[in-house]
């Protein structure tokens, strides 16, 4: 009886292993395909991730070995990219928070394409002395595309702008400001496929201050 139980247990274990390794579209619980990478992301990248009870160290019923051998390699590459690449990644949250807490730079969004640098200077200089303004540009046309960076000489002046200017109107638009870790060359260009901001690629409504309809809607 004991031998039969061992044989059954071993057979089921081999079947489980075969199901893991064979090409498949899902079995038993399709969400396992999403749970495993989330666990690996938490272990390798150090990001906040929900750890399902199956992987809990106190009483695990699943192993992270197979996800580590498969999708784990991609997460390790991401970690190396974060540590050695030219741009910070998701693993640099603590460093990013430190930069934000001492930053004197604001990101300003929801601007009209027709708002000028002089108008922005006039408004934001009410909070303090401005060091420089970097206008956001369409990557293709090199024209304004609705955002900018405002850098102050002091943190206190930047805090005043966040407190008093965020949510006010400029060119009849409610502008949004947020802390920025610091401007780097290249960030002044839109990241949308057509050269502008991503939000203007998919926008379905008509916005006269931001070029009319979104780019995708215009092409339909």
Image (tube, grey):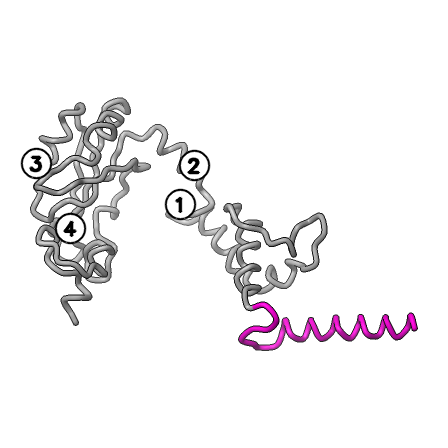
Farthest bottom residue in view: 23
- Spatial CA distance of label 4 from label 1 is 25 Å
- Spatial CA distance of label 3 from label 1 is 32 Å
- Say which label, 2 or 4, has the lower sequence index: 2
Q: Nearer the viewer, mark 2 or mark 3?
A: 3
- Spatial CA distance of label 2 from label 3 is 33 Å
Quarter of the figure with the N terminus: bottom right
Mark 3 Cα shell of 10 Å, populated few (<14), some (14-19), many (≥20): few
* SS at badge 3: helix
- Mark 3 lies on residue: 119
Q: Where residue 129 sits in the image (x, y, percent)?
A: 17, 24
Left or right, residue 99 beside residue 6 = left
* SS at badge 1: loop
Task: Please provide the residue range marked out in magenta.
Answer: 1-29
- Mark 1 lies on residue: 88
The residue sitting at 33% across, 37% down in the picture is 181
Q: Nearer the viewer, mark 3 or mark 1?
A: 3
- Spatial CA distance of label 4 from label 3 is 15 Å
């Amino acid at each position: 009886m004991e031998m039969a139980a061992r044989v059954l247990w071993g057979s089921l274990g081999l079947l489980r292993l075969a199901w893991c390794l064979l090409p498949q579209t899902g079995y038993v619980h399709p969400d396992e395909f999403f749970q495993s990478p989330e666990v690996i992301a938490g272990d390798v990248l150090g990001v906040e991730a929900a750890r399902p009870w199956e992987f809990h160290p106190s009483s695990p019923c699943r192993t992270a070995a197979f996800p580590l051998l498969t999708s784990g390699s991609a997460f390790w590459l991401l970690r190396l990219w974060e540590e050695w690449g030219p741009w910070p990644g998701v693993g640099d949250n603590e460093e990013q928070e430190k930069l934000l807490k001492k930053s004197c730079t604001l990101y300003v969004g929801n601007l009209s394409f027709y708002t000028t640098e002089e108008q922005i200077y006039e408004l934001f200089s009410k909070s303090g002395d401005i060091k420089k303004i970097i206008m956001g540009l369409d990557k293709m046309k090199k024209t304004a595309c609705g955002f900018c960076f405002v850098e102050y000489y002091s943190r206190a002046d930047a805090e005043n702008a966040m407190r008093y200017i965020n949510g006010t109107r400029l060119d009849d638009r409610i502008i949004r400001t947020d802390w920025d870790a610091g401007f780097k060359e290249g960030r002044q260009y839109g990241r949308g496929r057509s050269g502008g901001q991503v939000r203007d690629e998919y926008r379905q409504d008509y916005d006269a201050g931001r070029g009319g309809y979104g780019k995708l809607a215009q092409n339909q």
